[in-house]
Amino acid sequence: MKQRLTVLGSTGSIGVNTLDVVARHPDRFEVFALSAARQVDLMLAQCQRFEPEFAVMASAPHARELAGRLAQTGLRTRVLDASDALERISSDPQVDVVMAAIVGAAGLAPCMAAARAGKRLLLANKEALVVGGAVFLDAVREGGAQLLPIDSEHSAIFQSLPEDPATWSRRVEKIILTASGGPFRERAVDTLHLVTPDQACAHPNWVMGRKISVDSATMMNKALEVIEASYLFGMAPAQIEVVIHPQSIIHSLVQYRDTSVVAQLGTPDMRVPIAYGLSWPERVASGAQALDFRALPTMTFDAPDPRRFPGLQLAWEVLTASTGSTAVLNAANEVAVQAFLDTRIRFDQIHQVNRRTLDGWAVPVVSGVGDLLEIDREARQRADGFVKTLET
């Protein structure tokens, strides 16, 4: 039988690539529901192509526009904009697989719903683990969900680890996350304050949304990935290392106790980890170009420069701090990046906002999602206050 799929964030780069893979295998997959923020034109085209049962837009005006245009086409797709619509399409009994590709803390609630409902959850949303942490993992275990990583680095680690998770602790020495270094890997550190949003969003290897592109430029995306890897694979922070690999051919590595290193290689194309997550434990065609080893460039590896990427170290700091600290970092960073994209602060001030938001923060006892969402709200408020002090 076909697997029925909900794609959260279908108009983003992960969502678009997911639907590309799905379209290659109409005998295996069909789309149950799609969600998007505001791209009505693209959502309409996706509905026409895949004919989902439901489409969710983030705001009522966009939902009304989509509903009106769908009515003109005669499609049966129903448009939802209720506050719990994302949770509904993520936990519906008809759904087998949920692709979680909504950027930011907004993706936590539908991920929790999918986890509690026991779905195969393809996690491209870092924040579900960064914000949810142990609370989210408890929901996965209690619901009997199947959690598979879609980030290229975490998928690479998953593919390089032993099949039996029970053996990881005794066989694995450490995991090594690779990072491209972003667009400013070689730029003079003393000129980073001049970086513009368009420059920060011009990633040399990957086509991504603006928020994650800025995170790549600051390497905060790698800090979030360190946090995510610690939760996903049960590794202590000290067992996680980051190395800059500008060619983005090796997507991450696992070093075993005997010092053997197993790596996953491939072209920088997100359809590879997406296809693996959709078909696991099998493998299906992804549409990506295969590596030609005769034409590969020289591969290089460097340690991250702490002066250029000061935010990276915050990952290890919050992982060893009180529960909820990772949620504080994520919330502060979302506020800071948006302030930079809105030209309210400079590029180099993103880290200042993150650092100041964390400093002196007393994280309360966390017992559930409500506590995490309250931490997220308060951290955003605190970070926005620091942004205002930096505005010129």
Image (cartoon, rainbow, N blue to C red):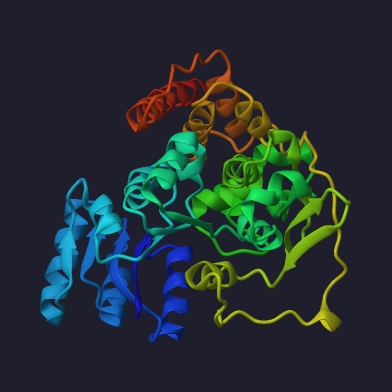
At x 31%, y 48%, the residue is 113
Tell me: 237 left or right of 26. right
In front of the other: 24 or 28? 28
Task: Tell me if residue 289 comes above or below residue 246 in the rendering.
Answer: below
Q: Residue at x 30, y 65 (%)?
A: 95
The correct choice, above or below, for 68 with respect to 167 in the image is below
- Residue drawn at point x = 44 percent, y = 21 percent: 382
- In the image, taking residue 233 as reference, residue 275 lies left or right, namely left
Report which quarter residue 271 is drawn in: bottom right
Q: In screen coordinates, is 104 left or right of 82?
A: right
Q: Is residue 32 above or below residue 81?
A: below
Vertical order, 20 against 346 (above or below):
below
State whether residue 382 appears in this view: yes
Give the image location of residue 98, x and y in percent: 38, 61
Residue 292 in picture, x, y percent from top left: 78, 82
Q: Quadrant of the N terminus?
A: bottom left
Task: Work out whether residue 192 or residue 109 is closer to the camera in this orientation and state it.
Answer: 109
Q: State the image quarter where residue 352 is shown.
A: top right
**Count of marks, rendered view:** 0
Answer with left or right where residue 26 lies relative to residue 266: left
Where residue 81 sits in the image (x, y, percent)? 18, 54
Q: Mark yes or no: residue 58 visible.
A: no
Q: Which percent across, then down, holds residue 65?
A: 17, 64
Considering depth in this image, is 357 or 322 the residue closer to the camera?
322
